[in-house]
Every structure is written in structure tokens, then in C-alpha cells.
Image: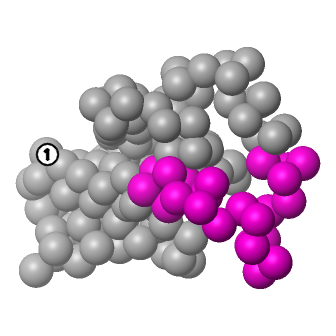
Amino acid sequence: MAYLTLFLTSFAAATLLPAYSEILLGTLANQGLPLFWLWLAATLGNTLGSVVNGVIGRQVDRFKDKRWFPISEMQLHKARNRFNRYGQWSLLLGWLPLGGDALTLIGGVMRVPWLNFIVLVGIGKGLRYALVIWAVEKAFS
């Protein structure tokens, strides 16, 4: 049950929902659960949550002209230009607490091929969770 809870919390944390998977991961790691499985559950959940952002991003052009749409055409243009400047490699930073979700959303808007999207986002998120586990192990060893 701990792995499912971590997976779902990590998934939610990658979307626009307020969730903090690092705290749960650190707590579970400190309880002696196998670290590899914790890392895998968190990484997969968070990466799949970012895929949801990518799917939403791919739908932006359908809704950008609607009055209720929260992003102006100018903001969307600026985001596309910034993404083009750094390219799909910026998806490695999809784990960042501020701006990471926006990066994955723009990755969808820019229609980064799914394999590239998932691999780059997964690498970044996997490294982040490995660092969290390492820090917890160092702090409590």
C-alpha cells in the first residue's frame, strides 16, 4: 500500500494539484522499505503525471481563443520562444518545484515526440528522487 500511495502522491505532485511527494518518499525511506521500489514508484508516478501535463499542452491550441482560457496569446508565444531557445533538453528540468510543471506543459504544446518527452522527464525526475533518497539516508545514518 505504501508504494501505491507514493505512486499516486508523486503523480499528483507532477500535475497542478498540490502534493509533495518528497516528504512521503523521505518518510517511507526512513522506515526501511526497499529503496529501489520506493524510487521506482515515485519516479514512475511523477513521470506519468508529467505526461498528463504534456497531453494537456497538446490541447492548448484547441482552447487558446476561448475567453476563459487563462493564458494569453502573448504569454503562449513567449513560452514557445523560450522553449525553442533551450529545446527539448529543458525537459530534464521538469522536476523543478517552480516552473517544472510549466516546462512539461510547454513540452506538450511544442509536441515533443512522446519517447523523447518521457525519457527526458523520467531521467530528471529519477535523478531528483535518487537525490532525495540519498539525502534521507545521509541524514539518518
Q: Is residue 94 left or right of residue 34?
A: right
Q: For numbered disc 1, what is the local secondary structure?
A: helix
Whether residue 88 is in magenta: the answer is no
Residue 129 on image: x %, y % = 36, 46
Closer to us: 9 or 36: 9
Residue in the picture at 50% in, 51% down:
58
Asked whether residue 131 is in view, the answer is no
Q: Residue furthest right?
A: 74
Closer to us: 21 or 139: 21
Residue in the picture at 23% in, 77% down:
5
Magenta span covers which residues?
Answer: 54-76
**Which residue was labeled with disc 1?**
36
Residue 59 on image: x %, y % = 52, 59
The chosen color scheme is one colour
Whether residue 61 is in magenta: the answer is yes
95 versus 9 height, above or below: above
Asked whether residue 64 is in view, the answer is yes
Residue 21 on image: x %, y % = 41, 66
Residue type at numbered disc 1: Phe
Number of residues whose C-alpha sits closer than 10 Å to that of mark 1, classed few (under 14), some (14–19) or many (20 or more): few
Residue 106 falls in image quadrant: top right
Residue 116 falls in image quadrant: top left
85 versus 125 height, above or below: above
Residue 74 on image: x %, y % = 90, 48
Closer to us: 15 or 25: 15
Residue in the picture at 59% in, 61% down:
62
Q: Which quarter shows the N terminus?
A: bottom left
